[in-house]
Image (cartoon, helix red, strand yellow):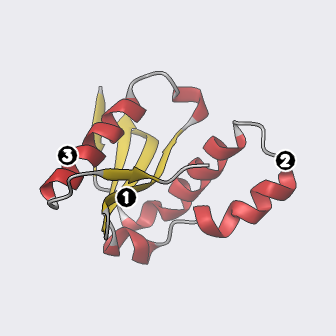
Amino acid sequence: MLILRAPQKSEHADLTDLCLRSKAYWGYDAIFMEQCQDELTITPDEIDATNFQVAEQNDLVIGVARAEKCDQGAELDLLYIDPDHMGAGAGRKLLNWALAHARSMGAERMIVVAD
């Protein structure tokens, strides 16, 4: 069963690894991935200070998303799915969470930050 929940601070390293594996799945070279390391690192403080959700299936975290309020409404600046679980619905569920979260913050639109 696929569920969404808030991440625990102790999961920060596993979430960072998930983001890096997901990004690398799309064929980026090692140099580019090294340059992404800081941007894709999730710290315990970030987990406390921002709005994250993780997708969990059978006690395994398979996705992560972060949505924040911004001047233009809301911003989805992080959504990554474990490559072995792509296509299982976790991305859709996390996107739906982000949209609902944005509405709950009063946002009328969401900017998706992606490359």
Label 1, label 3: how far apart the Cα atoms are:
12 Å
| Mark 2 vs 1: CB contact within 8 A | no
Q: Amino acid at mark 3?
A: Ala
Image quadrant where one finds the N terminus: top left
Label 3, label 2: how far apart the Cα atoms are:
35 Å
- Crowd class of label 1 (few under 14; some 14 to 19; many from 20; radius 10 Å): many
**Residue under the point 39% across and 25% down:** 89
Q: Which mark is residue 29?
A: 2
Q: Amino acid at mark 2?
A: Asp
Q: x, y (%) of residue 50?
A: 33, 69
Q: Amino acid at mark 1?
A: Glu
Label 2, label 1: how far apart the Cα atoms are:
27 Å
Residue for badge 1: 75
Disc 3, SS: helix
Which of the two labelled residues, at mark 1 and mark 3, occupies the earlier sequence position?
A: 1
**Residue under the point 65% across and 51% down:** 20
